Amino acid sequence: MSFPKSLSPSSKRLPTVEIQLDQIEEGTSLWQDAWRRLSSNRLALISFWLLVAMVLFCFVGPLLTSYSYRTPNLDNALQGPSWAHWFGTDDLGRDQLTRVMKGGQISLGVGILATTVSLIIGVLYGATAAYLGGKIDNAMMRFVDVLYALPFTIFVILLMTLFERSILLLFLVIGAVEWLTMARIVRGQVISLKRQEFIEAAVSMGLSTRRIIVRHLIPNVLGVVAVYATLTVPAVMLLESFLSFLGLGVQPPMPSWGSLIKLGADNLQLYPYLLVIPALFFSLTLFCLNFLGDGLRDALDPQSSKD
Amino acid sequence: MVTDWLSNSRKLGKYLLVLALASWVGCGDRIPNADQAVEQGILLKGNGAEPRTLDPQKATGVTENKVISALIEGLVTYHPTDDNEAEPGVAESWEANEDSSVWTFHLRDNARWSNGDPVTAHDFVYSYQRMLTPELAAEYVNMLFIIENAEAFNRGTVSDFSEVGVEALDDHTLRIQLVGPTPYFLGILQHYAWSPVHQPTIEAHGGMTDQSGTWTLPGNFVGNGPFILSEWRPNQLLRVERNPYYWDAERVALNGIIFFPISDDNTERRMFDSGQLHVTNTVRSNDIPNLRRTQPERLRMDPYLATYYYRFNTTRPPLDDVRVRRALALAVNRQRLVERVTMGDQSPAYAYVPPAFDGYENQTSLRHDPERARELLAEAGFPGGEGFPRLNLLFNTLEDHRKVAEAIVSMWNEELGIGMQLENKEWMVYLADQSQLNFDVARAGWVGDYLDPMTFLDMFVTDGGNNNTGWSNAEYDELIQRAQRSRTQEEHYQLLMDAERILMDEVPIAPLYWYTRIYLIDPRVKGWEPKALDNRPYKYVSLEAE
């Protein structure tokens, strides 16, 4: 069993611990290590830069095309890909390239934001419950069970009708219902970690509960969390398209990859390009996220070898 | 009929259909493909959503009607080609008094229920009593309110049914006393709300007001139509077979019909293309241009007695201002809408009542006039759309409605400079929002129930059940009332024309186009004529191998 480097050698005199910890961490922090290891993982690195390119494409791209994603051009409907419209036009004659970009904004936005929200809530909640244990753990996890039992759609509909409708709220609402599994996974991990020596050492040094959770437990579960987060992103993107379909999500003319794919699937036989192109972007993004998540798990695991 | 034939439970239906298809594999030998079915004389028909009930007095949808009209026959029934003609059904002949307020029907002696019992005038009296009994809560009960005292009986102010104007003079003579002159009564009488039901069957399964509908299940169902119900697998199929007791059984060419509840257009299309259907329920607008080129002989676009329109919520500013409503209605380029968006030979509608009636001329002041629209909007205080609040446009979740909505919102934006937020909702929510006036502008469609302009115009009377705009006009109400009592066709039409003029001057609704009934049909299906109400007397339909 190897400890995080910062903890092992120098815990003789309590008052100096904090200063020494900070000094030792310099130059070899978790994140620096992680980045170093990530850079040596070719697939993960390519995925990372592809995702960066995708974000640029979606957020900067619409400024560069001369078409509007919303104004129909009825004389130009359902044209296949051409020089004027690289990805063709949709059933109201709008440039599909622009709509794919705009749709990406929503899908990537909801993917990243909702996952972040679910990460923050889930990790903190799960770690706290597991570390505190006992009755508090019991109460906190039963609350999660109750939320699990609530039908998801009803919960979302409730939240969406209680508050003013907006895209941002949609992101938050999805995040707010997606954290449950995350909390359970983190709790399981932390329970197995908290009995280990490095935590006992941290306790014996008199660190505060909050500090132990944030500095010592959470970094150790980040690997699992990273992998689960990359699985959450696609799930969240799909959820968004499902909600849009029910009329609770993004409303037309604003597209999302989910709604573009749905339109494409409906017209697959005659206009396959309407499905193929957005589906390509969607799956490319998901692939990249998966490879990156894989790489992140290796890179973030403090227990893996450092050289 | 309830606002729309296009299905609503599409999404759920899709998943159920996957299940349905999976289970078909298991018993596939029993369902013939289109070629085998032609040989066996079985028509395979796509029928939209799953029928909610086969009880003719509880049914409210077009889907249900398609099945019920194969199973039950009224006094008069659908003519194979001409919608204005009434085809004799159980009634062999009939006569009306001078002002068309008392009708006497002579029932044929050989009309039989599917268990062999004779169909008598008493069956009709029983059926109308059941329909009017308040506990049954039949949604279409108001169709029968033209019978003397019927409304009073339904409201409970008359408790003795013998006071209601329906009387069996003997086993084969039925007299119906109406509240007033009703020259178009035979048209109304074709509606399934007037269907007879079999008293012993109903009494054996829970009685007159039983809501469970067990009497309509296969094995229990007793009807008097050309076909009998033989199998009903929910969400898979509904099978009817030739009824040997039907009085005109020799004329029935088909041995059976299988109705498939396919709510997903794509699945339906694939089934048609792969030879599993003879007639589809609908065609998606995006497929039409291609079908016109590749299979014109299979594509049908029949005129249909139905109007697609937008409702304005006249209780909310700024739509409470008639100038604003008018501006919105004038700014829409309907010609372009039907040519480029709906693409199915629909006609642009500048008035509400579909142009299907000889002697009835649409009265309207609407046209495509963006210039005037801008002036009106400026007069109302929103020059160039400035200061116009962001309104919501409500529609039920369906690709073709979404297309129309996006096209129209962009026309309003282009011509008037106003923005509007689209809001699609699930069918049931969409219906609830409309009846609670919880919308600004809402998409709507109305399919005529019978062949008279009244089926369109009477819904906009003050507090009418399908008004849903908050609009009310005393003069309009009075014209409709007088039209209901008018003695001659000319007078009737004239009053309704005056009413339509008021409707189009006040614009609580903006008509967009008159529907066409668009479907694919196997050329081997014969006797499937264009009908304004899309009603099929199945006994005249046949299948012929080429």
Image (tube, coloured by chain):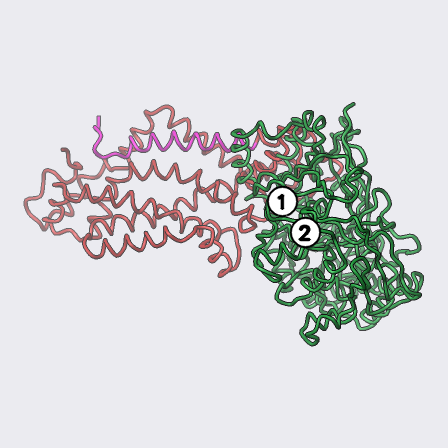
Chain colours: A red, B green
Q: Find out whether the residues at labels 2 and 1 contact each other: C-beta distance under 8 Å.
A: yes
In this picture, residue B465 sits left or right of residue A195? right
The image quadrant where one finds the N terminus of chain B is bottom right
Determine if residue A274 is in view: yes
In this picture, residue B267 sits left or right of residue B69? left
Please tell me which residue lies in front, A37 or B465.
Answer: B465
User: Which residue shows up at 79% across the image and 42% down it?
Assistant: B248
Q: Chain of mark 1?
A: B
Q: Position of residue B340 (x, y in %)?
A: 76, 39
The answer to which of marks 2 and 1 sits earlier in the sequence is 1
Q: Position of residue A187 (x, y in %)?
A: 25, 46
User: Label 2, label 1: how many angstroms apart (C-alpha)?
Assistant: 10 Å
- Label for residue B61? 2
Q: What residue is pinned by disc 1?
A: B49
In this picture, residue B29 sits left or right of residue B473? left
Magenta segment: A278-307
Q: Chain of mark 2?
A: B
The quarter of the displayed image where residue B538 is located: top right
In this picture, residue B282 sits left or right of residue A163? right
Q: Position of residue A286 (x, y in %)?
A: 45, 33
Per the picture, the main secondary structure of the magenta-coloured stretch is helix
- Mark 2 residue type: Gly
